[in-house]
Image: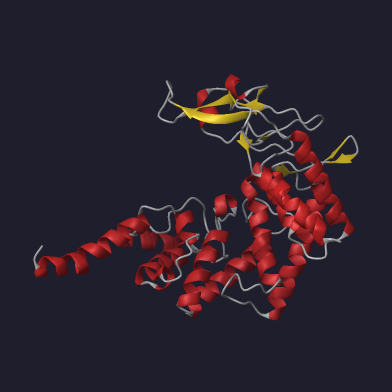
């Protein structure tokens, strides 16, 4: 390679390769990157401009957007026109909390006021969206349907509460520090959220257990979401709720009891001797999923369990319960997480948490 070609590679080709590497990643992986130097780059600043454009005046963001994707002038105009519409603002699938984290990381490297303002507007949005009972809906403003339920599904409410906790604790996790009034408000919202968690923990025959993926916003009872997401106890969502409760310093007797009950329930409902494998499918492009016997497999928990006796169940889009994953159709079997290993983190951290209370 001649010197001239080397220069061309360094000054033209190399930046393109770096750009491709970032744009090949998912938005989630970009947000969670620990490369602080990259957040100081012009590329990060360009993506931050997209994030600012997608934010609505109410403070929230829509979901499932690859914020790093290049926008045309027509795209930018459309987003500017949508600014005043609060429709589609949500915390589902990491929306809003992810964008706030990204802006915080960019602000740390480039302390520009526009990033701070957008972050604080997002924080105000999260607190405004909270129900008086302490829970959060999936969408705010409210969207008709199951979206109005208190939403633990996919850790939506837990993610919000982690934002509030970092803010109220002045942990420094976010590079943007709100005013004292906002910090106090965040602390109050967090405490209300904890109260909601305690009140929604399900009593099975009088005994505290775990949580459903969503709870009715009025009765606080387990509620249905999509056709295959029936009222149940959740092996997945309950784990993140328990971990959040375990993070509380000087926990109340009620919080301690909630954690103890959840740990007991996780121990009771763990499934041993099986693992989930992906196998070639005869029905579609996605790999199929099968349950395989394996005496050495780590414990698993069913995503959905019966409210009265913890029996796992599985559903197609017709909402008919089936006792095994093999009995539902390929589309739902391959396209949904019916088992989870997340509670193992609760059981792993429990001894240390227990000892910290002494």
**Above or below, 353 relative to 340:** below
Tell me which corner region of the image, top left, top right, bottom left or bottom right, holds residue 123. bottom right
Q: Is residue 160 visible?
A: yes
Q: Quadrant of the N terminus?
A: bottom left
Residue at the extreme front of the image, as rendered? 296
Q: Quadrant of the C terminus?
A: bottom right
| Colour convention of the picture | secondary structure
| Residue in the foreground of this view, choosing between 139 and 31 | 31
Please provide percent x and percent y for residue 232.
Answer: 73, 35
Tell me which corner region of the image, top left, top right, bottom left or bottom right, holds residue 165. bottom right
Please provide percent x and percent y for residue 44.
Answer: 40, 68
Residue at the extreme right of the image, as rendered? 206
Is 94 on the left or on the right of 79, as rendered? right
Is 151 on the left or on the right of 205, as rendered? left
Is 77 on the left or on the right of 95, as rendered? left
Please provide percent x and percent y for residue 125.
Answer: 62, 64
**Above or below, 297 relative to 70:** above
* Picture residue at 39% right of the left edge, 59% below the top: 68
**Above or below, 55 relative to 281:** below
Tell me which corner region of the image, top left, top right, bottom left or bottom right, holds residue 213. top right
* Picture residue at 59% right of the left edge, 72% below the top: 120
* Picture residue at 58% right of the left edge, 75% below the top: 176
Is 310 on the left or on the right of 35, as rendered? right
Q: Is residue 152 visible?
A: no
**Above or below, 308 relative to 63:** above
| Residue in the foreground of this view, choosing between 75 and 164 | 164
| Image label count | 0
| Residue in the foreground of this view, choosing between 223 and 276 | 276
* Picture residue at 71% right of the left edge, 59% below the top: 130
């Amino acid at each position: 390679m001649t010197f001239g070609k080397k220069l061309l590679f360094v000054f033209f080709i190399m930046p393109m390769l770096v750009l491709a590497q970032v744009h090949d990643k998912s938005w989630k992986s970009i947000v969670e990157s620990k490369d602080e130097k990259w957040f100081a780059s012009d590329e990060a600043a360009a993506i931050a401009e997209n994030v600012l454009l997608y934010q609505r005046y109410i403070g929230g963001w829509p979901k499932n957007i690859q914020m790093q994707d290049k926008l045309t002038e027509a795209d930018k105009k459309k987003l500017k026109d949508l600014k005043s519409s609060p429709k589609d603002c949500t915390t589902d699938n990491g929306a809003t909390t992810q964008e706030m984290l990204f802006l915080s990381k960019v602000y740390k490297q480039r302390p520009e006021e526009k990033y701070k303002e957008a972050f604080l507007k997002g924080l105000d949005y999260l607190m405004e969206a909270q129900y008086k009972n302490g829970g959060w809906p999936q969408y705010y403003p409210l969207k008709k349907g199951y979206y109005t339920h208190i939403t633990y599904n996919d850790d939506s409410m837990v993610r919000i509460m982690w934002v509030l906790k970092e803010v109220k604790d002045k942990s420094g996790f976010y590079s943007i520090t709100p005013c004292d009034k906002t910090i106090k408000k965040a602390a109050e919202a967090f405490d209300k959220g904890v109260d909601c968690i305690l009140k929604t923990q399900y009593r099975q025959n009088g005994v505290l257990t775990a949580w459903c993926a969503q709870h009715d916003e009025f009765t606080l009872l387990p509620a249905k979401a999509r056709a295959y997401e029936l009222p149940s106890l959740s092996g997945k969502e309950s784990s993140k709720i328990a971990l959040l409760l375990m993070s509380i310093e000087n926990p109340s007797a009620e919080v301690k009891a909630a954690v103890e009950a959840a740990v007991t329930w996780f121990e009771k409902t763990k499934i041993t001797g099986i693992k989930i494998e992906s196998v070639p499918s005869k029905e579609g492009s996605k790999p199929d999923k099968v349950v395989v016997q394996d005496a050495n497999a780590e414990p698993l928990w069913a995503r959905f369990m019966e409210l009265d006796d913890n029996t796992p169940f599985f559903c197609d889009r017709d909402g008919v319960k089936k006792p095994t994953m093999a009995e539902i159709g390929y589309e739902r079997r391959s396209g949904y997480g019916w088992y989870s290993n997340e509670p193992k983190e609760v059981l792993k951290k429990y001894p240390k948490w227990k000892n910290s209370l002494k």
